[in-house]
Image: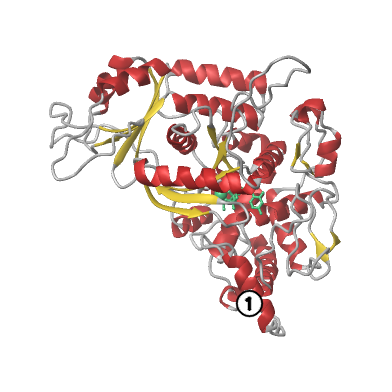
């Protein structure tokens, strides 16, 4: 079962069959996969970034004739892949075989002239198809299929799951429906690449990389796009001064702290995105947060974007989550299921607040998998011990070293089914001693809580930080009560056979009894000062 399901696991950011892709490319990619097996996140990122550099995003008409459209564009060179999608209008992503084709296409594109309005003459790879009288005819049927960029509604998912024959199949079906598609993943890298062109106005050698759920293997269609502005590649950074003799160095502006530099960089780039960035709207500069960021909507893709810089630890935790997800297919299945369950019951939310975040929830799943009697994944300390010299990484004094070579990691034999694990997850956290203990994936063992907080999850790389500092007691109680009820429901549904009425996992996604109740246990109210403190924390 695990081998069978493994095939679609690589869909999100790995290699797999894609629509409208030439046979030759398909073969190249599958050959590479066979040779290579699992690729490190670093390799996947580099490949995807290179594809994105050769791609353009074109707003077109829903009746655009696909053949004529491609013929028109291929005058600039071979097209390696293309697909259409809808996001407040029809768009096409077109990937050329060579970057010169993009340059040739841009050379031919015109600057629009509109009366009563003026244009900011900032050119980018976001284009519109215009005046194509012969290409678009009003009576023509759409000549192309659209690739979905959003998940199916929860009710539809519940119906789909009810038709499955086992809870294991329900879990794989949920993951299949929710995970990022090949196309969505390409679009995410393309948006980063378009943003890089804007940031390059200030820092020509910069790079913008996606991180978080867009690339860690746990992203759901529609999740936000976390972007990291990488300035470390700027040449001259690692040039060693000679011991004697002449040498030149750049004169540079100085600031009081690294944080101040981060804030000023994000401030100007945020301004540039706001004033000149085609398709970027609702720009907010949130520069006083612990991790300063610029938030905006990229309208053509429909992505909510968070741009940060100097956030290397988050890049490392993305890499770690990706590695855990690749080690055993059950990791991703369980994370997807728990995340979906949590969202259905309002345990997580898209609005920041005292809720458990998807990141915290993922770490909780990883911890649970480390705590099985035969652990499914190793501890972070073990991954650090396996690291080679090139894996060494210390960021701001934090040891972020862990092995990157999958083949060095020996897994313990564990044959538990997805159903057993899901049930086990709910049982584990229904009875977890949250009052005393902290969740720690570095050690793979619960630790005594170092500070007072309802939920304490140690940040894997910044040991003094609690990943779930924002969570209040009410939210934790709801989570525990929902775990208790879900354990009971899953045990009850063991005798069920597939029916049109929701059963098994599907029934867990329906409103549960405790979902509307703030807390099952009668809790003493927190003192006002605690509540204000937690409110201020969540606002921060
Ligand atoms: N991160 C972290 N420490 C935190 C919060 C986040 O290191 N306290 C890192 C994680 O690598 C996380 C990434 O920043 O994956 C992005 O954070 P966020 O967008 O909150 O989480 P995602 O994993 O992207 O999940 P979602 O789908 O909810 O966006
Ligand atoms: Mg995110």
Location of residue 138 in the rendering, given as x and y in whole percent from the top left corner: 13, 37
Scheme of image coloration = secondary structure
Location of residue 275 in the rendering, given as x and y in whole percent from the top left corner: 36, 45
Residue 375 in the image: above or below residue 403: below
Considering the image in quadrants, where does the N terminus appear?
top right
Q: On the rendered structure, is 222 left or right of 342?
A: left
Location of residue 300 in the rendering, given as x and y in whole percent from the top left corner: 35, 42
Q: Residue at x 53, y 16 (%)?
A: 28
Q: On the rendered structure, is 143 left or right of 247?
A: left
Question: Who is closer to the viewer here, 187 or 483?
Answer: 187
Quarter of the rendering containing residue 401: top right
Query: Residue 446: in sight, yes or no?
Result: yes
Q: On the rendered structure, is 374 left or right of 532?
A: right
Query: Residue 97: in sight, yes or no?
Result: no
Location of residue 244 in the rendering, given as x and y in whole percent from the top left corner: 77, 16
Q: Residue at x 58, y 39 (%)?
A: 215
Q: On the rendered structure, is 190 left or right of 276?
A: right
Q: Residue at x 13, y 36 (%)?
A: 139
Secondary element under disc 1, as helix, strand or loop, is helix
The count of marks equals: 1
Question: Who is closer to the viewer here, 536 or 288?
Answer: 288
Label 1 within 8 A of ligand 1 by Cβ = no
Considering the image in quadrants, where does the C terminus appear?
bottom right
Residue 535 in the image: above or below residue 273: below
Mark 1 lies on residue: 532
Badge 1 local density, few (<14 within 10 Å), some, or many (20+)? Answer: few
């Amino acid at each position: 079962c695990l081998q069978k399901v493994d095939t679609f696991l690589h869909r999100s950011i790995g290699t797999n069959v894609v629509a409208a892709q030439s046979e030759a490319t398909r073969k190249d990619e599958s050959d590479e996969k066979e040779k290579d097996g699992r690729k490190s996140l670093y390799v996947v990122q580099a490949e995807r970034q290179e594809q994105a550099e050769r791609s353009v995003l074109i707003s077109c008409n829903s009746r655009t004739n696909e053949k004529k459209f491609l013929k028109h564009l291929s005058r600039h060179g071979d097209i390696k892949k293309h697909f259409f999608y809808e996001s407040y209008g029809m768009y096409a992503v077109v990937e050329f075989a060579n970057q010169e084709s993009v340059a040739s296409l841009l050379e031919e594109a015109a600057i629009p002239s509109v009366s009563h309005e003026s244009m900011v003459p900032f050119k980018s790879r976001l284009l519109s198809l215009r005046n194509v009288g012969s290409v678009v005819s009003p009576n023509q049927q759409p000549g192309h299929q659209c690739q979905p960029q959003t998940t199916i509604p929860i009710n539809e998912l519940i119906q789909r799951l009810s038709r499955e024959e086992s809870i294991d199949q329900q879990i794989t079906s949920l993951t299949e429906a929710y995970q990022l598609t090949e196309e969505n993943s390409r679009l995410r890298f393309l948006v980063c690449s378009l943003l890089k062109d804007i940031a390059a106005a200030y820092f020509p050698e910069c790079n913008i990389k996606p991180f978080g759920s867009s690339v860690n293997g746990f992203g759901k269609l529609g999740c936000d796009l976390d972007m990291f502005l990488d300035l470390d590649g700027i040449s001259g950074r690692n040039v060693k001064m000679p011991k004697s003799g002449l040498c030149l160095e750049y004169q540079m502006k100085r600031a009081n702290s690294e944080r101040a530099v981060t804030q000023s960089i994000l401030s100007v780039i945020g301004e540039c995105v706001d004033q000149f960035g085609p398709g970027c709207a609702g720009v907010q500069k949130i520069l006083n947060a612990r991790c300063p960021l610029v938030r905006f909507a990229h309208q053509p893709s429909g992505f909510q974007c968070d741009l940060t810089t100097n956030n290397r630890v988050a890049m490392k935790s993305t890499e770690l989550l990706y590695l855990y997800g690749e080690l055993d297919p059950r990791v991703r299945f369980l994370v997807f299921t728990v995340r979906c369950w949590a969202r259905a019951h309002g345990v997580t939310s898209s609005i920041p607040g005292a809720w458990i975040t998807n990141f915290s929830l993922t770490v909780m799943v990883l911890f649970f998998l480390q705590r099985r009697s035969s652990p499914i994944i190793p501890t972070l300390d073990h991954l650090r011990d396996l690291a080679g010299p090139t894996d060494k990484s210390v960021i701001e004094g934090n040891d972020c070293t862990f092995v990157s070579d999958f083949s060095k990691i020996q897994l313990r034999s564990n044959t538990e089914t997805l159903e057993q694990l899901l049930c086990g997850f709910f049982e584990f956290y229904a009875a977890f001693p949250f009052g005393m203990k902290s969740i720690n994936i570095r050690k793979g063992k619960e630790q005594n809580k170092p500070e007072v907080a309802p939920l304490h999850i140690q940040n894997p790389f910044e040991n003094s930080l609690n990943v779930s500092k924002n969570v209040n007691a009410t939210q934790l109680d709801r989570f525990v009560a929902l775990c208790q009820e879900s354990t009971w429901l899953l045990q009850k549904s063991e005798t069920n056979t597939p029916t049109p009425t929701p059963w098994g996992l599907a029934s867990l996604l329906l409103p549960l009894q405790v979902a509307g109740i703030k807390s099952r246990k009668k809790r003493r109210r927190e003192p006002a000062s605690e509540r204000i403190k937690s409110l201020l924390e969540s606002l921060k």
